[in-house]
Image (cartoon, grey):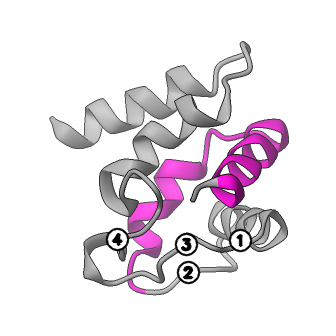
């Protein structure tokens, strides 16, 4: 049930109506923390401090299957419905977290 709700949140947040970075990040915060300060499930890198280009590359890599470590299977469904605009918005938002 939890996975269904998370996927539904991603789909809603990435609908034809562009969402802001804070809205998009709510799903990410579940594992990465409110300020992206956590290692997701103690297996990922901490993404706080990453620049937008690095975040964009990672998200696009998850989306096309060319990036990812132990949480690749978790991240692919999270990003599959994000379009280029949503990825750019999300990356810029994460870059600005302090």
Q: Are marks 3 and 4 in contact (CB under 8 Å)?
A: no
- The residue that disc 4 covers is 40
| Residue segment shown in magenta | 70-96
Residue 61 tag number:
1
Give whichever of discs 3 and 1 has the lower sequence position: 3
Q: Are marks 1 and 2 in contact (CB under 8 Å)?
A: yes
Q: Are marks 4 and 1 in contact (CB under 8 Å)?
A: no
Give how far across and how far down residue 26 sits, in percent: 44, 38
| Viewer-nearest residue: 34 or 8 | 34
Label 4 secondary element: helix
Q: Seen in the image, is 3 located left or right of residue 20?
A: left
At horizontal 52% and vertical 42% (from top left) the residue drawn is 25
| Image quarter hosting the C terminus | bottom right
- The residue that disc 3 covers is 47
Give whichever of discs 1 and 2 has the lower sequence position: 1
Give how far across and how far down residue 85 sits, in percent: 83, 37
- The residue that disc 2 covers is 68
31 is higher (above) or lower (below) than 72 = above
- Within-10-Å neighbours for mark 2: few <14, some 14–19, many 20+: some
Give whichever of discs 4 and 2 has the lower sequence position: 4
Residue 5 tag number:
none
39 is higher (above) or lower (below) than 83 = below
Q: Are marks 3 and 2 in contact (CB under 8 Å)?
A: no
Closest to the camera, between mark 3 and mark 1, is 3
Label 2 secondary element: loop
Give whichever of discs 3 and 2 has the lower sequence position: 3
Determine the CA span between mark 3 and mark 1: 15 Å
Q: Seen in the image, is 33 located left or right of residue 76?
A: left
- Total numbered badges shown on the rendered structure: 4
Determine the CA span between mark 4 and mark 2: 13 Å
Label 1 secondary element: helix
């Amino acid at each position: 049930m939890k996975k269904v709700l998370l996927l539904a949140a991603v789909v809603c947040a990435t609908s034809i109506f562009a969402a802001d970075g804070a809205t998009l990040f709510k799903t990410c915060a579940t594992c990465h923390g409110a300020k992206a300060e956590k290692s997701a499930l103690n297996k990922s890198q901490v993404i706080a401090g990453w620049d937008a280009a690095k975040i964009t590359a990672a998200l696009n890599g998850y989306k096309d299957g060319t990036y990812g470590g132990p949480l690749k299977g978790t991240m692919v469904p999270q990003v599959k419905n994000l379009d280029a605009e949503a990825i750019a918005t999300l990356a810029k938002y994460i870059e600005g977290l302090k």
